[in-house]
Image: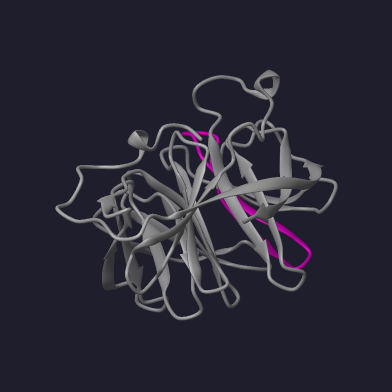
């Protein structure tokens, strides 16, 4: 595991029980567009929905499984940097990075049907069945009403009692919030009631060094197939999506 000092803040006076450290094994590897600067990943309808970033290259995509073929795509305006993505009923909700603007699409047609604003940067996004959950690069997650997009509550995230910064792409899995931590190979499993990190999944080494292109190609994508209980992970500019099994 990369040093915990990368993702932990100042120690509090007293710390709770430490988070469990989890390992993984790769079940299968699938092709992925290595030009996609992945910012959001969802499993639904037998394939993936993806949000990609970078100015002039950001998009919303439907990706066929297991081929990795992009079968539907809409490009964002060149001044928008795509970020997190969530599915709420028949709507896809996409964040943008510094524009303070969220985009709402029809799930089937990818037609833009609305937008909304927020005051922070936009990083990761997921849906817990009641509220959207948004990260902004800080140590706090914000719950949003999925109809009005107004904040409902905020959740400070703590790992062994310390704030965790750079929370990025999110997924809601079996009652827990899973969060990538930017510039690490770690995924946190967070209690949505308390903000406590209950487990830390170390994915160091999942992408071979020969497949890395530079400092930007970091782990940043979690998707969950609830029907078959499959977990998928990917990253920015990664040539592969990995199906993994957790080793406890």
Residue in view at x 32 percent, y 48 percent: 164
Residue 83's x, y, as percent? 47, 48
Residue in view at x 51 percent, y 40 percent: 53
Residue 193, magenta (yes or no): no
Specify start and end residues of the magenta stretch as a single range.
40-58
Its colouring scheme is: one colour
Residue 126's x, y, as percent? 49, 64
- Left or right: 190, with 88 as reference point: left
Give whichever of 193, 227 is nearer the camera. 193
- Left or right: 41, with 98 as reference point: right
Residue 82's x, y, as percent? 48, 46
The image quarter containing residue 102 is bottom left
Residue in view at x 72 percent, y 33 percent: 239
- Left or right: 178, with 142 as reference point: right
Name of the residue lying farthest toward the left: 13
Give whichever of 104, 227 is nearer the camera. 227
Residue 32 higher or lower than 122, as above or below: above
Residue 201's x, y, as percent? 54, 49
Residue 18 higher or lower than 181, as above or below: below
Residue in view at x 47 percent, y 36 percent: 184
Residue 57, magenta (yes or no): yes
The image quarter containing residue 174 is bottom right
Give whichever of 118, 24 is nearer the camera. 24
Residue 217 higher or lower than 159, as above or below: above
Q: Is residue 148 visible?
A: yes
Question: For the C terminus, which image quadrant?
Answer: bottom right
Q: Is residue 42 visible?
A: no
The image quarter containing residue 9 is top left
The total number of labels drawn is: 0
């Amino acid at each position: 595991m990369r040093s915990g000092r990368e993702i932990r803040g100042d120690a509090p006076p007293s710390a709770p029980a430490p988070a469990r450290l989890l390992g993984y094994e790769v079940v299968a590897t699938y092709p992925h567009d290595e030009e996609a600067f992945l910012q959001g990943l969802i499993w639904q309808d037998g394939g993936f929905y993806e949000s990609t970033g970078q100015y002039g290259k950001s998009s919303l995509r439907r990706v066929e499984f297991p081929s990795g073929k992009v079968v539907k795509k809409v490009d964002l305006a060149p001044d928008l940097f795509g970020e997190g993505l969530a599915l709420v009923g028949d709507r896809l909700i996409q964040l943008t990075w510094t524009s303070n603007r969220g985009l709402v699409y029809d799930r089937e047609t990818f037609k833009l049907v609305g937008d909304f604003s927020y005051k922070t940067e936009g990083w990761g996004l997921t849906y817990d069945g009641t509220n959207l959950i948004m990260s902004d690069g800080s140590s706090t997650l914000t719950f949003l009403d999925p109809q009005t997009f107004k904040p409902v509550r905020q959740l400070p995230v703590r790992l062994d009692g310390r704030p965790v910064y750079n929370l990025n792409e999110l997924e809601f899995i079996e009652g827990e919030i899973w969060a990538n931590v930017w510039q690490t190979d770690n995924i946190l499993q967070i209690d949505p009631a308390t903000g406590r990190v209950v487990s830390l999944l170390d994915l160091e080494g999942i992408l071979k060094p020969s497949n890395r292109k530079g400092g930007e190609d970091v782990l940043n994508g979690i998707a969950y197939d609830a029907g078959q209980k499959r977990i998928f992970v990917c990253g920015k500019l990664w040539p592969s999506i990995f199906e993994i099994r957790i080793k406890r």
